[in-house]
Amino acid sequence: MTRKLTEAVAFDALVPPQDVGTAPVTSGYLDCTHAGRIVLLAKAGAVTAGKVLTVQARQAKDAAGTGAKELGVAATAAGVGGASPPDVEVEFVPEDLDGKNGFTHVGVTLSIDEAAKLGAAYLARGNRRYGP
């Protein structure tokens, strides 16, 4: 029997739509211990031409953000005047986390270099070892 996509992948909002231009917004952290694949999905509203959405994946040891640090390099997308920057997808596997030092949770920092602009980020965890 074929499973639905929503049964195979856990989707969670890390940063619900909000102003990420006035100041960067860092999300909470979600457990990725049982995920085989992890994708951060980010979206921004309309911006002035050349303004940039920056998506920085972060890792922590727990949901409280203990020891939080960057995970890889920041991904960016530039807007075209009056339109949204392209969506940003950052995919990685659990081995990319610093598991040797106990990092199991993933979060994100979103920012746009233009005040009062909306952005949002979601986490998709797939190939899970256990059900939802």
Image: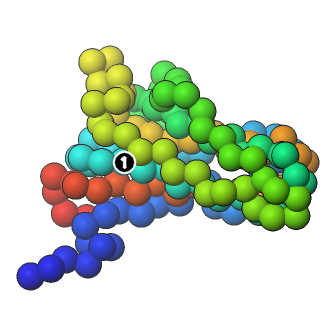
In this picture the colour scheme is rainbow
Q: Residue furthest top?
A: 101
Residue 54 at what x, y percent from top left?
A: 68, 40
Q: Is residue 44 above or below residue 78?
A: below
Residue 22 in view here: yes
Q: What residue type is labelled 1?
A: Ile
Q: Is residue 16 above or below residue 115?
A: below
Residue 17 at what x, y percent from top left?
A: 69, 62
Residue 97 at what x, y percent from top left?
A: 36, 29
Which is nearer the eye, 20 or 73? 73
Say left or right for 123 vs 52: left
Q: Residue furthest left?
A: 1
Give the residue at x 15% y 79%: 2
Q: Please rate how many residues cluster around mark 1, counting C-alpha atoms within 10 Å: few if below 14, some from 14 to 19, many from 20.
A: many
Say left or right for 19 vs 9: right
Give the residue at x 90% y 48%: 115
Residue 63 in view here: no
Which image quadrant for residue 112? top right
Mark 1, secondary structure of its residue: strand
- Count of numbered labels shown in the rendering: 1
Q: Which residue lies furthest to the bottom in this view?
A: 1
Residue 67 at what x, y percent from top left?
A: 48, 22
Give the residue at x 19% y 63%: 131
Which image quadrant for residue 109? top right
Query: Quadrant of the image for the C terminus?
Result: bottom left
Q: Is residue 104 above or below residue 122?
A: above
Which is nearer the eye, 114 or 58? 114
Give the residue at x 83% y 46%: 51
Quickly name the residue at label 1.
38
